[in-house]
């Protein structure tokens, strides 16, 4: 049985005080949730304050990105050990916005995953196709290459720490969610590919989140599907009431 994981990716939003206010409200709203991993990914500047706020609660912390070296002359970068030091359990790697605006390739994503795992962080690895790729019928080819190039070569123990987030780029921030069937189809495909690069037993344990315009109204329909194990939420994770409603989705 895979435990559901719902994560809020705040992207470049919230000052430290806004972040603290948010998480104080969220803590109360989700205090009774026991069977779901709840994760927030604030900006780097808010990590320390949020880490203190969530101590002893059922909310966990993620970085939105990481660098692969542990220290040195890499102006502007943050290492896995720094994320660990500040209380992160998870780290989002290879988000489509990083790939699009900062030229991140599958090869760099793989290096970031490796370095994060070595520090005991749990990577949330993002994959997903662009609109032109979907329209050209290339969704499965694109996702397959991403899965193989980002994830091939990790050990069983490492694979068990990895969560995959399928985020079709055309569904991010557009209000245009993939239908639950479209998402399930790609999730099942990702699991199958994971089975080829590891083995069936390991791939059955890997959690696959869906991301792209998830909100309180569509989460339940997504979560009914057997290969959808959670959500990576952008816009709807910025308000405590909407994020908590996503976390507390109705099971059907
Ligand atoms: P939205 O939920 O705003 O579409 O963003 C999804 C996302 O990119 C989460 O990482």
Image (cartoon, rainbow, N blue to C red):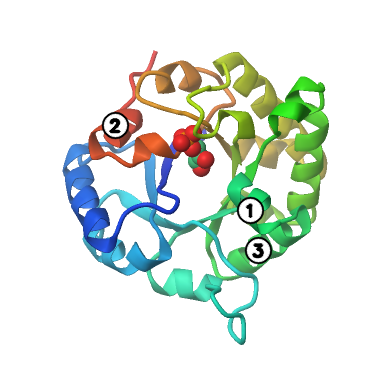
Determine the secondary structure under disc 2: helix
Q: Earlier in the sequence, mark 3 or mark 1?
A: 1
Work out whether 17 lies above or below 27: below
Q: Quadrant of the C terminus?
A: top left
Residue 178 place in picture, x, y as percent: 58, 21
The image quarter containing residue 36 is: top left
Q: How far is mark 3 from mark 1, CA to CA? A: 17 Å
Work out whether 186 lies above or below 51: above
Residue 111 place in picture, x, y as percent: 71, 64
Circle nearer the viewer, 3 or 2: 2
User: Is residue 198 visible in the rendered structure shown here?
Assistant: no
Tell me the residue at 81%/21% (across/down): 137
Tell me the residue at 27%/55% (across/down): 19
Determine the secondary structure under disc 3: helix
Callout 1: few (<14), some (14-19), or many (20+) C-alpha neighbours within 10 Å?
A: few
| Mark drawn on residue 101 | 1
Determine the secondary structure under disc 1: helix
| Mark drawn on residue 242 | 2
Q: Do the CB atoms of the residues marked 3 and 1 lie less than 8 Å apart?
A: no
Tell me the residue at 65%/60% (across/down): 113
Q: Earlier in the sequence, mark 3 or mark 2?
A: 3
Circle nearer the viewer, 3 or 1: 1
């Amino acid at each position: 049985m895979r435990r559901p994981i719902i994560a809020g990716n705040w992207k470049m939003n919230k000052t430290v005080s806004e972040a603290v206010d948010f998480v104080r409200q969220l803590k109360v709203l989700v205090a009774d949730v026991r069977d779901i991993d709840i994760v927030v990914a604030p900006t780097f500047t808010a990590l320390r304050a949020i880490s203190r706020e969530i101590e002893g609660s059922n909310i966990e912390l993620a970085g939105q990105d990481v660098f692969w070296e542990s220290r040195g002359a890499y102006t502007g970068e943050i290492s896995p050990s720094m994320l660990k030091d500040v209380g992160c359990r998870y780290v989002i790697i290879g988000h489509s916005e990083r790939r699009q605006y900062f030229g991140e390739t599958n090869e760099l994503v793989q290096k970031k995953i490796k370095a994060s795992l070595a520090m005991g962080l749990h990577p949330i690895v993002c994959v997903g196709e662009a609109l032109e790729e979907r329209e050209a019928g290339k969704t499965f080819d694109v996702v397959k290459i991403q899965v193989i190039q980002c994830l091939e070569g990790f050990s069983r123990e490492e694979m068990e720490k990895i969560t995959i987030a399928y985020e079709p780029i055309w569904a991010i921030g557009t209000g245009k969610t993939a239908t639950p069937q479209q998402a399930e189809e790609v999730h099942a495909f990702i699991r199958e590919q994971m089975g080829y690069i590891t083995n069936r037993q390991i791939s059955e344990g890997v959690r696959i989140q869906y991301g792209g315009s998830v909100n309180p109204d569509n989460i339940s329909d997504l979560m009914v599907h057997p290969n959808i194990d959670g959500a990576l939420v952008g816009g709807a994770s910025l308000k405590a009431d909407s994020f908590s409603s996503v976390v507390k989705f109705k099971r059907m």
